[in-house]
Image (spheres, rainbow, N blue to C red):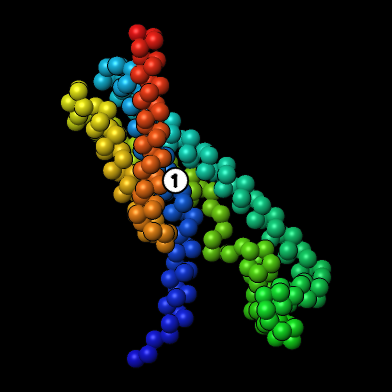
């Protein structure tokens, strides 16, 4: 039985683009959870604070970070959604009042992409007959109906992913001997960042190694800086 290669390719691309919104929110929340919580805890630990103070800092960072991510993602994606809806509303109004002009505009888009004028007009007419607004959204506005911004989805995914992965440095603290608190928090966190980076890169179609290196390097720099600051403050205040 023969298979159509164009169907399999389009399905793969659709699946990847369809998960772009929630994947972005999940990866951003997870990476930020590990980097910010681990950095906060390492900074406090470097100041020679007791274990309970480091734990309180980690838990506070988890709760505050999850709420901040949820609110931030909701506001950001809501703004994007409002802009998309405004563009769609304007396009719907123009299609109702000037349908022929909009058809000509759609055809000219295809001409600029390389089609002959007659063929471009036929394509515009056929696509408009099937879904006039959808054709203009996709080819004029660059908006895909299947990937419209979803504020609530982005908010809860970001909060859940942040809360879940912020537990990593907290667990490392709980099982680490007193003399190895900072190294174990850093090791657990960097290993998790590398795994997350590779996983996110694979899902998004990017090279896993490059993605893992990028997030691990950034996390290591953040932890190093906060450790230095925590050490300086601990010495000066102490």
Q: Which residue is mark 1?
A: 28
Query: Is any atom of residue 126 visible in this view?
Result: yes
Q: Judge whether residue 129 can be spotted in this image.
A: no
On the rendered structure, is 21 left or right of 97? left
Task: Pick the residue in front: 106 or 156.
Answer: 106
Residue 215 image-quadrant placement: top left
Q: Which residue sits at x=48%, y=69%?
A: 14
Vertical placement of 105 versus 195: above or below? below
Q: Position of residue 78 (x, y in %)?
A: 59, 47
Q: Residue at x 54, y 48 (%)?
A: 151
Position of 226 with respect to 155 (left or right) is left
- Quarter of the image with the N terminus in it: bottom left
Q: Residue at x 38, y 53 (%)?
A: 210
Q: Position of residue 164 (x, y in %)?
A: 34, 41
Drawn side of residue 157 relative to residue 119, left or right: left
Circle 1 sits in a helix, a strand or a loop, which is it?
helix
- Of all residues, the one furthest to the bottom in this rendering is 1
Between residues 207 and 150, which one lies in front from this camera angle? Answer: 207
User: Measured along the vertical axis of the image, is residue 179 above or below residue 5?
Assistant: above
x, y percentage for residue 236?
Answer: 39, 10
Q: Residue at x 81, y 73 (%)?
A: 101
- Apparent side of residue 97 relative to residue 77 in the rendered image (left or right): right
């Amino acid at each position: 039985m023969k298979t159509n290669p164009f169907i399999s390719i389009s399905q793969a691309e659709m699946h990847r683009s369809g998960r772009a919104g929630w994947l972005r929110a999940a990866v951003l929340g997870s990476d930020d959870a590990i980097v910010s919580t681990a950095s906060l805890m390492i900074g406090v630990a470097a100041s020679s604070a007791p274990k309970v103070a480091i734990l309180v800092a980690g838990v506070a960072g988890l709760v505050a970070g999850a709420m901040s991510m949820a609110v931030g993602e909701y506001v950001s994606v809501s703004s994007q959604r409002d802009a998309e809806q405004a563009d769609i509303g304007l396009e719907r109004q123009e299609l109702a009042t000037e349908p022929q002009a909009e058809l000509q505009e759609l055809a000219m888009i295809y001409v600029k992409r390389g089609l002959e004028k007659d063929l471009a007009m036929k394509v515009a007419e056929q696509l408009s007959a099937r879904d006039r607004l959808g054709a203009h959204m996709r080819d004029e506005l660059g908006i895909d109906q299947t990937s419209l911004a979803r504020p609530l989805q982005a908010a809860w995914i970001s909060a859940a992913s942040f809360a879940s992965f912020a537990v990593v440095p907290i667990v490392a603290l709980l099982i680490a001997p007193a003399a190895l608190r900072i190294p174990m928090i850093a090791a657990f966190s960097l290993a998790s960042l590398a795994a997350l980076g590779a996983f996110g890169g694979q899902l998004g179609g990017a090279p896993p190694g490059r993605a893992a290196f990028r997030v691990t390097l950034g996390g290591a720099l953040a932890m190093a800086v906060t450790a230095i600051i925590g050490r300086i403050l601990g010495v000066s205040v102490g």
